């Protein structure tokens, strides 16, 4: 294995303990541990060591007990294709760790327009992987239906000649969703309106510290972050959103009935966006959000500063 992986299995009663090295991070683990490696793994596993790894995440999940604090470690060179049948990450309480740094991290590639990874397992965490599309107009890459799901450092890599329409959509069951520390790049617009991250009636969502650099479809229906059905207690903070495209009028759009906070974001857009419209949130409170539609110019506070009542 690569030098950034160090694994030990001292026993504590019936629990298996594991530690591994990733950049500036040490994770104590209580629960089952499985390794996944598309290059050296097999369908039979049993996955208890890098030498006996499973070949796919689905194979490891199949032998995982729900809510048992299971951790899956993906080799840095691990690669999977998400085809029409899709993938079901359906076991609760599982953490999927991608090992490696930069471009040397596990990569998942969506290969058909209807390919989707459905994350239905509650309290699933997905960390440090790369996602991309090899097909034009991939409709929606992730569908989150479980509560308590976290995406941490789950990047979208510029696919070049192809474009995805949407990276993530939820159902209203996906409460307490967290999306943080992700870096997404797609410089070519899709052919359809793009709600890149779409929240559908979720409660207690956090979208924090992400960077999205996109040229989106020129449509009033395109939004970088969309609460298309009212979101409750939603926190959208410290994101950098370059969301370019003619006729786009809103960068962050949470519809009537939405509550929570939109704070400390920086948005950059095409000229059809206005100071009043860059961030919309109905009943959401806003502070220190900036917006600009001109390169080489500093942003304006958006919306306008409140006045003392």
Image (cartoon, rainbow, N blue to C red):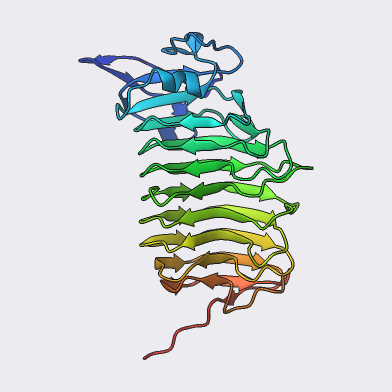
Residue furthest bottom as drawn:
309
Rendered location of residue 64, percent (x, y): 37, 21
Residue 6 visible in image: no
Q: Is residue 83 left or right of residue 69?
A: right
Which quarter of the rendered picture does the N terminus lie within? top right
Left or right? Give the position of 60 relative to 135.
left
Residue 199 shown left or right of residue 69 in the figure:
right
Q: Position of residue 306 (x, y in %)?
A: 45, 84
| Residue 245 position in % (x across, y down) | 72, 63
Q: Is residue 16 visible?
A: yes
Camera-side residue of 30 and 10: 30
Give 179 or 167, whichever is nearer the viewer: 167
The structure residue drawn at horizontal position 51% and vertical position 72%, both measured from the top left corner, is 280
Q: Residue at x 40, y 36 (%)?
A: 124
Specify the quadrant of the image occupied by residue 37.
top right
Residue 299, compared with residue 51, is above or below; it is below
């Amino acid at each position: 294995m690569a030098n950034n992986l160090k694994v030990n299995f001292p026993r504590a009663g019936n629990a298996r303990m594991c530690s591994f090295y990733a950049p500036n991070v040490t994770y104590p683990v209580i629960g089952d541990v499985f390794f996944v490696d598309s290059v050296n793994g097999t369908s039979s596993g049993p996955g208890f060591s890098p030498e006996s790894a499973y070949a796919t995440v689905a194979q490891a999940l199949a032998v995982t007990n729900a809510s048992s604090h299971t951790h899956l470690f993906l080799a840095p060179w691990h690669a999977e294709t998400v085809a029409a049948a899709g993938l079901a990450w359906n076991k609760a309480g599982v953490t999927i760790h991608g090992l490696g740094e930069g471009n040397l991290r596990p990569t998942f590639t969506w290969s058909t327009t209807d390919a989707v990874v459905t994350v239905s397992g509650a309290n699933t965490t997905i960390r440090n992987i790369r996602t991309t599309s090899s097909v034009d107009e991939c409709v929606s890459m992730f569908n989150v239906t479980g509560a308590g799901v976290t995406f941490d450092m789950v990047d979208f890599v510029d696919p070049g000649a192809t474009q995805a329409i949407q990276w993530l959509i939820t159902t209203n069951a996906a409460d307490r969703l967290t999306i943080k520390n992700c870096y997404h790049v797609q410089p070519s617009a899709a052919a359809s309106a793009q709600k890149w991250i779409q929240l559908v009636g979720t409660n207690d969502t956090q979208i924090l510290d992400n960077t999205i650099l996109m040229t989106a479809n020129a449509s009033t229906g395109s939004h970088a972050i969309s609460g298309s059905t009212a979101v409750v207690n939603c926190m959208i903070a410290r994101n950098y959103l370059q969301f370019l495209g003619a006729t786009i009028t809103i960068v962050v759009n949470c519809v009537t009935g939405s509550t929570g906070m939109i704070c400390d974001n920086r948005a950059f857009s095409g000229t059809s966006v206005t100071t009043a419209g860059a961030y919309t949130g109905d009943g959401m409170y806003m502070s220190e959000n900036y917006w600009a539609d001109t390169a080489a110019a500093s942003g304006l506070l958006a919306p306008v500063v409140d006045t003392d009542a």
